[in-house]
Image (cartoon, rainbow, N blue to C red):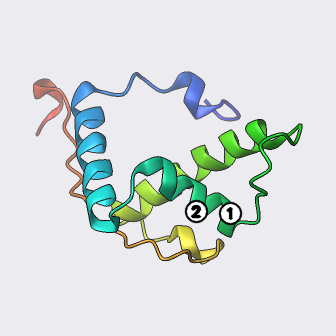
């Protein structure tokens, strides 16, 4: 699978993982008193994105930046070791940790 795009070859995300992600987002929003859209917007502005939504490349670059930010924040929350803020400006976000539990099929457990 070398050279393949993980998003294209990975198995579907289990529903349980989506439920846990939604819970974490809710906790992040409650911790900061902001909804996810405002958190994303503040992150984009901190990274230097203009709030000029009429700019021709705003929506494409903002979409990619939001994806990268979400990916980085959830890895940070799961204790991946790297922080989103290692190479992005702080913008007052209070992070919350989440619990990661990996489950396999019954026949795969030792």
In percent of width and height, residue 18 lies at 30, 33
User: What number of labels is visible?
Assistant: 2
Looking at the image, residue 47 lies above or below residue 66: below
Looking at the image, which is closer to me, 31 or 19? 31
Looking at the image, which is closer to me, 21 or 14? 21
User: Residue 72 vs residue 108: left or right?
Assistant: right
Looking at the image, residue 47 lies above or below residue 69: below
Are the two marked residues, 1 and 2, in contact with CB atoms closer than 8 angstroms?
Answer: yes
Query: Could one spot residue 85 in this view of the protein?
Result: yes
User: Residue 5 vs residue 69: left or right?
Assistant: right
Query: Could one spot residue 96 in this view of the protein?
Result: no
Residue at image point 71% right, 34% down: 3
User: Residue 73 vs residue 78: left or right?
Assistant: right
In percent of width and height, residue 63 lies at 67, 39
User: Residue 96 vs residue 72: left or right?
Assistant: left
- Mark 1 residue crowding within 10 angstroms, few (<14) / some (14–19) / many (20+): few
Say which quadrant the N terminus sits in: top right
Label annotation for residue 42: 2
Examine the image and state in which quarter residue 45 appears: bottom right
- Mark 2 residue crowding within 10 angstroms, few (<14) / some (14–19) / many (20+): some
Say which quadrant the C terminus sits in: top left
In percent of width and height, residue 24 lies at 27, 51
Residue at image point 27% right, 36% down: 17
Determine the secondary structure under disc 2: helix
The answer for how far apart the CA atoms under marks 1 and 2 are is 5 Å
In percent of width and height, residue 107 lies at 13, 25
Determine the secondary structure under disc 1: helix
Looking at the image, which is closer to me, 44 or 4? 44
Q: Which residue is mark 1?
A: 45
């Amino acid at each position: 699978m070398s050279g393949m795009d993980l998003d294209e070859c990975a198995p579907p995300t289990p529903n349980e993982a989506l439920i846990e992600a939604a819970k974490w987002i809710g906790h992040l929003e409650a911790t900061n008193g902001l909804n996810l859209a405002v958190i994303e917007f503040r992150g984009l502005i901190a990274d230097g994105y203009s709030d000029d939504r009429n700019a021709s490349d705003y929506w494409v670059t903002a979409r990619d930046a939001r994806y990268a930010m979400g990916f980085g924040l959830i890895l940070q929350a799961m204790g991946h070791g790297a922080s989103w803020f290692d190479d992005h400006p702080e913008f007052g976000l209070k992070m919350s940790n989440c619990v990661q539990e990996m489950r396999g099929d019954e026949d795969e457990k030792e």
